[in-house]
Image: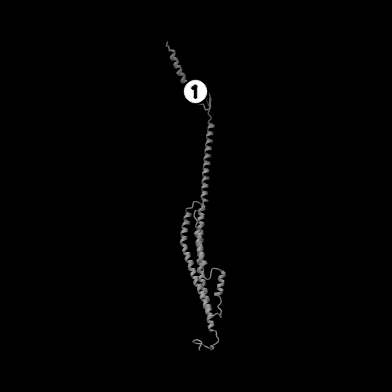
């Protein structure tokens, strides 16, 4: 008969019990419903957890969408600010000065100005019908007046031409500046304003062209008017020369003083 000491048997029983306890607890720990301990109960619900995770993901997505929307609105405001920014350059003063110089040249027209009433009066007095009763001195004076008008018109036309040519260099510099401003415009308003100023420059150049054509046309009109009036005066003088008149009438002649 084999005898085992009580202390050794107790130690072996404790070890065997300790090894058997985990095996008995495995079904409890692996149970998806709950785990029970001596001091309380913890419940884990996989479905609720999944719903919470999905809700958090959706909330995060909404926050990201709101952030993106705010970024887009901020960029839109920035673009609107750029589009509303005014052009920092203006060529209006220079263009107005060019137009004023051309107008001053036209206003300095000699003898016959660019005014309808004055033109009608001058043509009626100086370029009208030649009277048969006009004296030779009067005919000569009228012809000299018409010649002065023609020469003055030619001089006025050349002065306007010089003024228009002088504006070319200023217009070239303004055009280069405005094109640069248009290409470097940060928004729609600046580009539009630069385009408007380019149109204003073009209008000023057209004004110079109209002034030049007017001055040249005036000088040509005066030449033709003088030519037509000279032809009429020649006809009148020829008619007066060919018209029979009274013959030679003798008269008293006095020579060398009073003839004491």
The residue furthest top is 1
- In the image, taking residue 132 as reference, residue 5 lies left or right, namely left
* Residue 135 at x, y percent in the picture: 54, 80
Location of mark 1 (residue):
25
* Residue 220 at x, y percent in the picture: 50, 71
Colouring style: one colour
Q: The N terminus is located in which quarter? A: top left
Dot 1 crowding, Cα within 10 Å, few <14, some 14–19, many 20+: few
* Residue 196 at x, y percent in the picture: 52, 57
Question: Between 84 and 32, which is closer to the camera in this rendering?
Answer: 84
Question: Between 187 and 162, which is closer to the camera in this rendering?
Answer: 162
Which residue is pictured at 46% across the width and 20% down the height? 18
Residue 194 in the image: above or below residue 224? above
Residue 121 in the image: above or below residue 64? below
Question: Which picture quadrant has residue 47?
Answer: top right
Which residue is pictured at 48% across the width and 21% down the height? 21
Residue 182 in the image: above or below residue 52? below
* Residue 118 at x, y percent in the picture: 56, 70
Q: How many marks?
A: 1
Question: Between 124 and 85, which is closer to the camera in this rendering?
Answer: 124
Q: Is residue 52 visible?
A: yes
Q: Please, what secondary structure does the residue beneath circle 1 have?
A: helix
The residue furthest left is 2
Q: Is residue 206 visible?
A: no
């Amino acid at each position: 008969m084999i005898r085992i000491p009580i202390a050794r048997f107790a130690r072996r029983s404790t070890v065997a019990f300790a090894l058997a306890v985990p095996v008995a607890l495995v079904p409890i720990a692996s149970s998806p419903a709950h785990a029970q301990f001596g001091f309380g109960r913890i419940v884990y619900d996989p479905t609720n957890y999944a719903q919470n995770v999905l809700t958090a993901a959706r909330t995060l997505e909404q926050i990201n969408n709101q952030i993106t929307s705010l970024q887009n609105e901020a960029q839109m405001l920035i673009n609107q600010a750029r589009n509303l920014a005014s052009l920092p350059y203006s060529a209006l003063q220079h263009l107005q000065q060019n137009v004023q110089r051309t107008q001053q040249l036209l206003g300095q027209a000699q003898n016959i100005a660019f005014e309808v009433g004055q033109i009608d009066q001058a043509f009626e007095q100086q370029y009208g019908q030649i009277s048969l009763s006009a004296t030779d001195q009067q005919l000569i004076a009228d012809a000299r007046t018409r010649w002065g008008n023609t020469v003055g018109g030619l001089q006025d036309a050349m002065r306007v031409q010089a003024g228009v040519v002088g504006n070319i260099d200023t217009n070239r510099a303004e055009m280069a500046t405005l094109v640069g401003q248009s290409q470097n415009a940060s928004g729609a308003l600046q580009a539009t304003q630069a385009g408007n100023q380019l149109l204003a420059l073009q209008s000023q150049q057209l004004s110079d062209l109209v002034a030049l054509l007017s001055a040249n046309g005036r000088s040509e009109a005066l030449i033709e008017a003088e030519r037509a009036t000279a032809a009429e005066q020649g006809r009148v003088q020829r008619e007066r020369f060919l018209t029979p008149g009274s013959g030679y009438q003798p008269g008293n002649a006095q020579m060398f003083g009073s003839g004491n």
